Amino acid sequence: MAAMPPSSQAGAQEPELTINVVSDVVCPWCFLGKRRLEAAIDLYKQRFPNRPDPVVTWSPFQLNPDMPAEGVDRAEHMAKKFGKAQLDQIHERMVGIGNDIGISFDFEATKRQPNTLAAHSLIELAAGHGLQDEMAEALFQAFFVDGADLTNNAVLIDIAVRAGLPGETAEIALANAGMRDHVATQDKRARELGVSGVPFFIFNNKLAVSGAHEPESLLGAMIEAEKQAATA
């Protein structure tokens, strides 16, 4: 765990517990981290049934910020990055962990490694509709389970609609260069704050946890963040 610098919104009235998740939609550990965070929030609600539910928001991080807009062949990209033997071991491990928490990873189905600015633009769009969590879930499912091509705007729009967003609104967002620039700026800010890997969880804009930790560890961070807020 690490302390975070004060938020620029310090002094604004916030919910009792906020959780910002910095992630990338092509990061399998981020998908696992989402499931573990959901389990941690369930534990939190059981322990503190009279407290407001934690408020979760999502922020972008690009594992491959220099990826071309059209993406690359995923098998070649991953083999070059990890080596075929190590990659097979990683996938086998991820499939096993995923099976334990309800994620049916299908790494063979995914053929294209995308630039993720467009996908993150949809998560940003979803914030204004109260559907960020649904959008992140839909993108994770599409990429890691269904093998969807996230470089294809038609595919992205369909995913957005399944998450509850209006298709026309999603289409406009994907064509908005300013929104992609905004996402890139958020990515840059995350790196300036010290984020070098994801998932990265920020509790109450003060306490940070890097990695897809077990639910009990994330629950501990929630409780610690609330204690810090109470004594601030």
Image: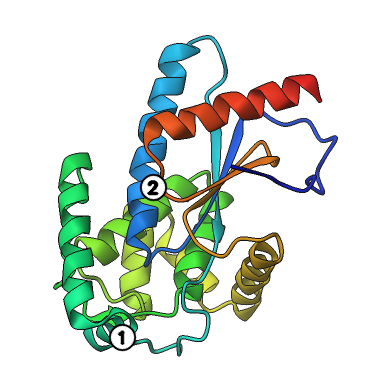
Return the disc, 2 or 1, that comes first in the chain's sequence.
2
| Colour setup of the view | rainbow
**Residue denoted by label 2:** 33
Task: Tell me residue 208's x, y (percent).
Answer: 61, 44
Residue type, numbered disc 2: Gly
Report whether residue 160 is seen. Answer: yes
Q: Quadrant of the N terminus?
A: top right
Badge count? 2
Residue at the spot x=22%, y=57% of the render? 94
Q: Classify residue 114 by image quadrant.
A: bottom left
Q: Classify residue 24 by image quadrant.
A: bottom left
Direction from residue 31 to residue 83 in the image, left or right = left
Report whether residue 164 is seen. Answer: no
Distance between mark 2 and mark 1 Cα atoms: 23 Å
Residue at the spot x=51%, y=27% of the render? 220
| Residue 77 circle label | 1
| Residue 144 circle label | none
Direction from residue 208 to residue 132 in the image, left or right = left
Task: Tell me residue 12's x, y (percent).
Answer: 81, 35
Q: Quadrant of the C terminus?
A: top right
Residue at the spot x=52%, y=43% of the render? 130
Looking at the image, the residue that sits furthest to the right is 11
Q: Classify residue 189 by image quadrant.
A: bottom right
Residue type, numbered disc 1: His
Q: Is residue 205 above or below residue 148?
A: above
Direction from residue 166 to residue 191 in the image, left or right = right
For mark 1, give the secondary structure: helix
Task: Tell me residue 230's x, y (percent).
Answer: 74, 20
